[in-house]
Amino acid sequence: MSSESKNAASITEADIGTYAFEIDDYSSKIRNIGVGGFVRSDTFTVGGLDWAIRFYPNGIHEGSKQFVITTLELMSSNAEARALCPQTR
């Protein structure tokens, strides 16, 4: 087996889901949480796996502190998955 074959990934199953993450009280406490600080959504299920959204209002590190960043976090233990979050405007 070539090294190319060993590293190739294949999708055996795909699921699509949506989740609305609303922050009700976006006060200065959350808005100024600091670099690396985040708010986590409730856990939700897509494709039989549990996920959560992390919302960083002041970026993840100093180089991103001028940006609002969201990430998708796999909450299911002992699971491996890949996720794609399309950009919307």
Image: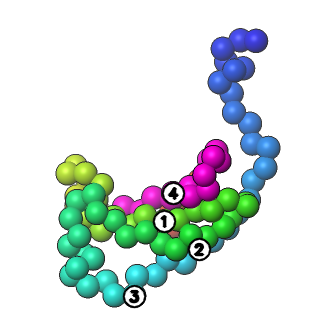
- Asked if disc 4 and disc 1 are in contact, CB closer than 8 Å, the reply is yes
Identify whether 8 is placed above or below 30. above
Distance from disc 1 to disc 2, alpha carbons, whole Å, reads 9 Å
Measuring from the top left, give residue 87's x and y in whole percent.
51, 61
Helix, strand or loop under label 1: strand
From the viewer's perspective, is 28 left or right of 41? left
View extreme (front): residue: 77
Q: Amino acid at mark 2?
A: Tyr
Residue that mark 2 sits on = 19
Earlier along the polypeptide chain: callout 1 or callout 3?
Answer: 3
In depth, the one of 30 and 5 nearer the eye is 30
Query: Neighbour class for label 1 at 10 Å: few (<14), some, many (≥20)?
Result: many
Q: Secondary structure at mark 4?
A: strand
Query: Residue at the spot x=69%, y=20% of the render?
Result: 6
Q: Which residue is mark 1?
A: 53
Q: Residues within 10 Å of mark 4 (few under 14, many from 20)?
A: some
Identity of the residue drawn at 76% across and 12% down: 1
Span highlighted in magenta in the image: 68-82
Residue for badge 3: 24
Task: Measure the C-alpha gap from mark 1 to mark 3.
Answer: 15 Å
